[in-house]
Amino acid sequence: MSPELQAQIQIWRAKALNNTLTESEMAQAIAAMRADRMGAAHASEKSKVKNAKAVIPSADDLLGALDGL
């Protein structure tokens, strides 16, 4: 997370505590935090696949196997 984003998050938190956070700012905060989490999830997924002893099947493959039961 960049220093600029961390500073902006602190501003959003202060405004939220003071009940002065606008809907537009809230949308910006949510978008920024979701974008950061998406990057973390992508990095985590690569790590899981790399460190797995066996190939991890996709959720679609697992659900497809249940359809045949």
Image (cartoon, rainbow, N blue to C red):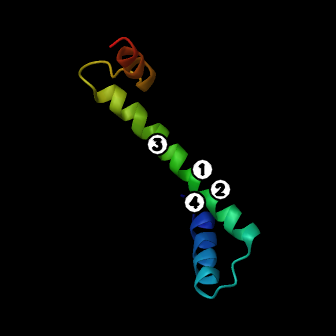
The residue sitting at 23% across, 22% down in the picture is 53
In front: label 1 or label 4: 1
User: Where residue 31 appears, x then y in whole percent?
Assistant: 65, 56
The residue positioned 51% from the left and 50% from the top of the image is 37
Label placed on residue 35: 1
Query: Hey, which residue is sitting farthest bottom in the picture?
Result: 18
Mark closest to the chain's N terminus, 3 or 2: 2
| Amino acid on which disc 1 is placed | Ala
Which mark, residue 2? 4
Number of the label disc, if any, that sits on residue 58: none
Q: CA distance from mark 2 to mark 1?
A: 6 Å
Q: Which mark is residue 31?
A: 2
Residue furthest to the top: 68
Q: Is residue 63 above or below residue 4?
A: above
Q: Is residue 56 above or below residue 29?
A: above
Do tag 3 and tag 2 residues touch (Cβ < 8 Å)?
no
> Distance from label 1 to label 3 (Cα)?
10 Å
- Indicate which label's residue lies in the foreground, 4 or 2: 2
The three-letter amino acid code for the residue at tag 4 is: Ser
Q: Earlier in the sequence, mark 4 or mark 2?
A: 4
Mark 3 and mark 2: Cα distance apart in space: 15 Å
43 sits left or right of 25 in the view: left
In the picture of the structure, the residue carrying the numbered disc 3 is 41
**Disc 3/disc 4 C-alpha distance (Å):** 17 Å
At horizontal 54% and vertical 45% (from top left) the residue drawn is 38
